[in-house]
Image (cartoon, helix red, strand yellow):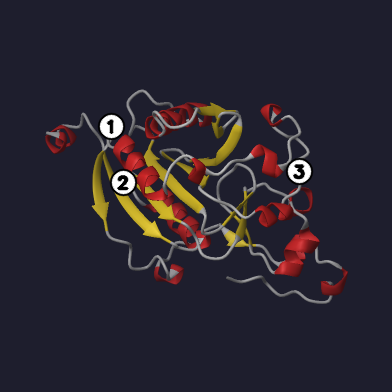
Amino acid sequence: MAVAQARNGSVPLINLLRLKGVPILQQLHLEERLLRTSSDNWCIINDGTTRPTIVMGISGKPKELLETDVVLRDGIPVTRRFSGGGTVIVDQGTIFVSFICNKDAIPGLQSYPQPIMSWSSLIYKNTFQGIGDFGLRENDYVLGNRKFGGNAQSITKNRWVHHTSFLWDYEVSNMGYLKMPDRALEYRQARSHVEFICRMKEYISRSKFIDRTMNAVATYFVLTALEEPQDIHNPSASKFQPSTRLLTTHELGEPTHLRNTATQITL
């Protein structure tokens, strides 16, 4: 029945791509390429990434957001993504869910940040039905008054991407790489990183979260499961040149003992 509706145009199709442990840089390259070169709707779920990596929004300034001396000392990669939003550190405890859609994919949805954010919250409200106290607070997903999901968006003339990093688990020590933001969200109330965020694993298993999210997406789309693209691990296989990239030590500010080097942090 759903397929017949999709063919008649009443229910949109979306390609579902499930990944596991794909490095976040490669995932962001793929998302940017699909945003700018594909005409299909996509939902990408990546269950964890490889080594800890800091991901900044397109306009983020390392010196204002990061403890750069410690980041460089420990060799933590810093990626500047193509979308807006804040700064996060991600690792194997992070689950990523991304939507890449045509602006007319959801009937009546305006392709502006707040409407897209509000629409996405309805999906996760369904996911967390009966589990915790889910809410949308100042562009964050929260359980109670603690953040567990950070969001970012990029909107073009005809398409948009909305992607979320979910803290299923995290290492407390990794929070030390991030500075307290100068312009903190009002509901944060000057809480430290550890006081401000929570672990999803205290509420739901990884597999249950992913399964329930796919079921929630299926209330808006007909899902078509696809295999992993062959060139996801080889960005050079595509002529598309993504803007998402790793920052160099020079861009991070180079502490005193590294001022005479210009090496790039690599994965």
Q: Which residue is mark 3?
A: 180
The answer to whether the residue labelled 1 contacts the one labelled 2, judged by CB atoms less than 8 Å apart, is no
Which one is earlier in the sequence, the residue at label 2 or at label 3?
Answer: 2
Front-lying residue, 229 or 211: 211
The amino acid type of the residue labelled 3 equals Met
* 174 shown above or below 198: below
Relative side of 31 to 169, left or right? left
Q: Residue at x 73, y 54 (%)?
A: 176
Image quarter for residue 229? bottom left
The amino acid type found where label 2 is placed reads Asp
Which of discs 1 and 2 lies nearer the camera? The answer is: 1
Question: In this figure, which residue is indicated by the disc labeled 1?
Answer: 219
Q: Nearer the viewer, mark 2 or mark 3?
A: 3
Dot placed on the residue nearer the N-terminal end, 1 or 2: 2
What element does badge 3 sit on? loop
Q: Name the spot of residue 251 as percent of width and height, x first.
A: 74, 62
Q: Which residue is mark 2?
A: 40
* Rendered view: 4 above or below 53: above
SS at circle 2: loop
Amino acid tagged 1: Thr
**If the image is split into quadrants, where does the N terminus sit?**
top left
Residue 14 position within the rendered picture, expressed as x and y whole percent measured from the top left: 29, 43
Crowd tier of the residue under label 2, counting other residues whose Cα lies within 10 Å: few below 14, some 14–19, many 20 or above? some
**Coordinates of residue 5 in the picture (x, y in percent):** 15, 32
Residue 156's disc number: none
The residue under the point 64% across, 43% down is: 86
The image quadrant that residue 182 belongs to is top right
Along the polypeptide, which appears first: circle 1 or circle 3? 3
* Residue for point 76% across, 48% down: 179
